[in-house]
Amino acid sequence: MGKQITGIRGMNDLYGSEVEAFDYLLAQAQQTLHQYGYQSIRLPIVEKTELFARSIGEVTDIVEKEMYTFADRNGDSLTLRPEGTAGCVRAVIENGLTHNQVQKLYYSGPMFRYERPQKGRYRQFHQLGVEVFGLSEADIDAELIAMTARLWEKLGLENLELQINSLGSQEARQAYRDKLVAYLLEHEAHLDEDSLRRLQTNPLRILDSKNPDMKALIEGAPKLLEHLDEESKAHFEALKTYLDDLGIDYVVNPNLVRGLDYYNRTVFEWVTTELGAQGTVCAGGRYDGLVEQIGGKATPAVGFAMGLERLTALLMDKQLVPAHTDADLYLVLVGEQVNRPGIVIAEKLRDDFPALNVQMNCGGGSFKSQFKKADKSGARYAIILGDQEVQDQTVAVKPLRDTTEQATLRWDELSAYLKPLFA
């Protein structure tokens, strides 16, 4: 026997109740998105490295430390996607989807970042991403947030806090950046190693530091909201008015900056305190300059991504996933001549009752062992076929969840007999 090969750290198998919760979450999210008129788009997992360096920012943690990058056989530098927005922007430009039209798109699938694995955060993780192209006003920002709030309600998730902020225009943010750097240089001795590294490259990220020793310093920093341009102020006030009208509670977090360089104006996060330190389950914002930055015509855009593993963990912790659907019918097949007619009967039942869960015993076994399987499946009725039944072209229908009498029926009578039982 060869040495066992194990999976890669932080790249996990999903099975059993966890994958049921994952699939349930995705189905509920897709149903909500379709309710709002969003359409699916499928994107490659691998993109040119330049796409992420140019869009996310070369001095972000993702590009500097976390990307899975490799050279293919032609020597081209390729990267497993660390997030979905850049690839979606590349796709809409390349396929001409933003020419004088609005696009409301969503996608889901695995993303890859080399970071320390912990609950809800893995090196291969899954996101559902939503992107809107061609709309510049705050009403679409509000719709995206309202759509996520509706999903939380549908899932039964409570205690999620909405945090919002505005980063203003690129010009206003640059002016603020200069003021922030001047302030931080005055307190350089109190900056931790991470903040010193970011000081000249990505200083706004210092505001998002989780180091408690930095808290007082950050609280004393100039506030971005006090340095917004007038248009961004009006946009942010409009967003708050929409949220107030919708009855969606929010907290204005002036230190919310997001980890990617392409954001401007609205940024938001849905945060939970129930998953430890890694509390963001959905985050996004506006990125009006990114389409042009990647080579397209200037197009306003806004979107978000939600972490499916984190939301799955929340659903499982709170037992909010419906129980696995039990079987409705279980075919018990015991004898030398039963398998061929048995599989035909099972398929006929699936034809006649497409909404029912019909399971058939495979692999043989005694009556006793098969009835144990039938009971474990949760089926309401066992359909019993033995050699005598094959000879008579009949089946026995035995109730497994009540004390009503067992019935013997001809094969051509079976569906008509079952129909009122599942009406």
Image (cartoon, grey):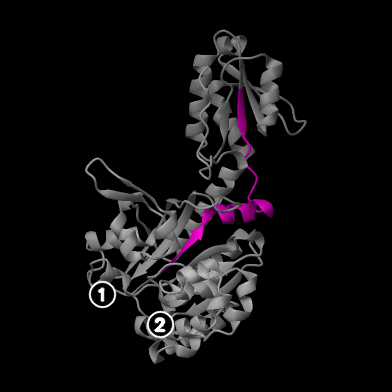
Res 395 label: none
Q: Given the image, on which type of amino acid does mark 1 rest? A: Ala
Start and end of the magenta stretch?
303-331
Does residue 129 belong to the magenta stretch? no
In screen coordinates, is 421 left or right of 283? right
| Left or right: residue 154 compared with residue 367 | left
At label 1, counting other C-alpha atoms closer than 10 Å, the crowd grade (few under 14, some 14-19, many 20 or more) is: some
In this view, 13 is above or below 213 = above
Residue drawn at 52 percent across, 66 percent down: 194
Image location (x, y in percent) of residue 252: 56, 81
Residue 304 among those drawn in magenta: yes
Secondary structure type for disc 2: helix
Report the residue that reaches farthest toward the top: 336
- Up the image or down, 357 lies above or below 291; here it is above
Q: CA distance from mark 2 to mark 1?
A: 19 Å
Q: Nearer the viewer, residue 341 or 239?
A: 239
At x 64%, y 71%, the residue is 212
Residue under pointer 2: 173
In this view of the protein, can residue 347 be seen by the observer? Answer: yes
Which is nearer the eye, 384 or 155?
A: 155
The residue tagged 1 is 298
State the residue in front, 85 or 171.
Answer: 171
